[in-house]
Amino acid sequence: MKRFATLATAAVLTFAIASPANATPDVHPEIEAMLAELPGGTVLSFDEAYWADLDMTMTVPNPFARSVGSCATGSICAYTAIGLSGTKLSWGTCATHTVPGSFVTRSVANARAAGSVAQARNGTTILASASSGTSTNVTGTTTNIRCLE
């Protein structure tokens, strides 16, 4: 009986050590290397980790991300200043979006999939266009942002 208990304990310990719950989370190799060098970090996602004691975040670039400036992947964005600065409005759907009258659009960004176009328009008049992965400055009064795919 004593031998059976020893074998059972060994089997439980082996299972616990090798189980996926105790394995390193699925992380980018660069994040894994930094965690090994600087213990104490918290994995936030596959490509991001945070070290609270250092107030440091590490983010590995995603080669598939199409973000443009601060305009997140999959979005169309309008900004109140040229060069993607100032206050931002963003939309995650490809449609015609009304721009509020109090919002003065001075630049637009298109972070949507290849082949899409973002147009800053006044009514139906195109003021500026940004193809996928690009941005452009806008002159004139923008009343809507139109996305075409």
Image (cartoon, rainbow, N blue to C red):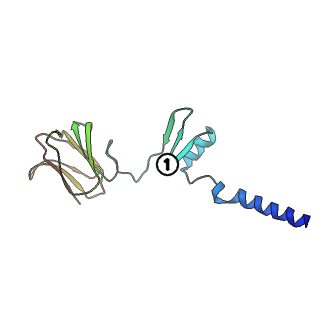
Residue 130 position, x and y percent, is 22, 49
| Mark 1 neighbour class, 10 Å CA radius: few under 14, some 14 to 19, many 20 or more | some
72 lies left or right of 31: left
Q: Residue furthest front?
A: 1
94 lies left or right of 65: left
- Residue on which the image places disc 1: 47
- Which residue is found at the position 49% from the left and 48% from the top? 47
Residue 78 position, x and y percent, is 23, 44
- Which residue is found at the position 16% from the left and 41% from the top? 138
- Which residue is found at the position 26% from the left and 41% from the top? 88
Instruction: Give the quarter of the figure containing the N terminus.
Output: bottom right
Figure quadrant of residue 20: bottom right
Number of numbered markers: 1
Residue 35 position, x and y percent, is 60, 42
Figure quadrant of residue 64: bottom left
Dot 1 falls on a residue whose secondary structure is loop
Figure quadrant of residue 137: top left
123 lies left or right of 42: left
Q: Residue furthest right?
A: 2
In-front residue for pair 138/99: 99
Q: Please name the amino acid that badge 1 sits on.
A: Asp
- Which residue is found at the position 15% from the left and 49% from the top? 144
Instruction: Give the quarter of the figure containing the C terminus.
Output: bottom left
Q: Is residue 61 above or below residue 96?
A: above
Residue 125 position, x and y percent, is 8, 50
